[in-house]
Amino acid sequence: MSGTVSELRRYPIKSFQTSLVDQVDLGPDGIIGDRFLGLREVGTDRVLSAKAPRLGETLLSFAAEFDRTPTAGQPMPAVTVTIDGKSFSTTDGAAISAAASAALDMDVELVTAGAEALNYASEWPDIGEGFALSGIEIDLPSALAERGSFADLEPLHILTTASIAHIQERAGDSVINSDRFRPSILIDTADAEGLIENDWEDRTATIGGATIQFGSTAPRCVMTTRAQAGLPRDKNVLQTIAAQNKRPFGGFGDFPSLGIYAVVVDPGPVAVGDALTFT
């Protein structure tokens, strides 16, 4: 056994906040219901992301919660959305679109991930030489949109308590916790030390009732620095990760990295307290 599930997160709407959940179902494309909705800028092919320079912290102030647990093979339940202290239901998508448009000062609409391949705007702060993306703004494809999710690159992002502790020890007064990194699953690795996900690439593991395949370590971007969920804006977070863990990704070059991506090999339920065991 390499650790136990400490936290689970399912985000009904891309770049919105959500709360921790006790159990999720992993389907072929990740956590059932994760980021199946997003806000699209009307008249463009862009889905909004908190990586966008002007919009990020406003988007992260919005919240979304399922009214009941989504189940594989069943229609998605309604989601309660909170924008500027007011609550709405996705049964009235027009009301959510109007409230979000007013808060963001731009014309947006609530959309479901599906057949269309959408892009999203992202900001990559200057973190020095030798990184693939540094000091630029760029549109990137929403890679999983056609499969029903607005997750950025891979279905699952997994992070360990060992890596969080490693970065915290080197980040001075910065607050380093899982909220900053929005992982799908946080693994408590007990007394393990260091950036241990770096050694998990290409390995297979069981987790709860599912089997997953680890891929590349996860590139980190401006999202780690955004003010969100009681955390202040803090550029030092990304700078510390860049100094500690420079890793290649997808043939594009080196990125500051923390955590690791994974895909689902065999679907199944995962609950807090379940073991992660390499096969």
Image (cartoon, rainbow, N blue to C red):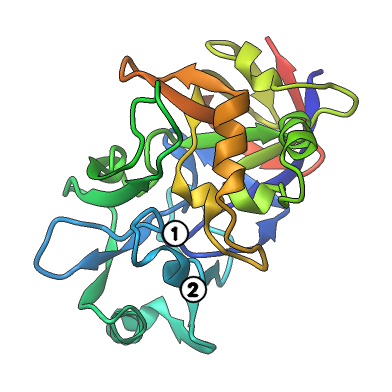
Quarter-wise, where is residue 165 in the image? top right
Residue visible at 42% across and 36% down in the picture: 29
Mark 2 touches mark 1? (CB < 8 Å): yes
Q: Is residue 85 left or right of residue 171?
A: left
Residue 213 at x, y = what percent? 53, 19
| Residue reaching furthest to the bottom | 86
Q: Does residue 257 appear left or right of residue 51 in this picture?
A: right
Type of amino acid under label 1: Ser
Q: Can residue 196 be seen in this view?
A: yes
Q: Is residue 177 above or below residue 52?
A: above
Query: Residue shown at 54%/52% (left/top)?
Result: 225
Q: Is residue 112 above or below residue 6?
A: below
- Quadrant holding the N terminus: top right
Of residues 206 and 128, the one drawn nearer to the viewer in this rendering: 128
Mark carried by residue 15: 1
Query: Relative to the observer, which residue lies in front, 125 or 92?
Result: 125
- Front one among 210 and 62: 62
Query: Quick one: label 1, few (<14), some, or many (20+) residues within 10 Å?
Result: many
Pick whichever, 123 or 216, lies toward us: 123
Disc 2 element: loop
Under tag 1, what secondary structure?
loop
Residue located farthest toward the right when viewing the structure as drawn: 191
Q: In this view, does 221 lie to the left or right of 23?
A: left
Residue at x 40%, y 60% (from the top left corner): 75
| Res 278 → quadrant | top right
x and y percentages locating residue 265 in the rendered image: 50, 22
Give the label on residue 62, or none. Answer: 2
Q: Can residue 258 be seen in this view?
A: no
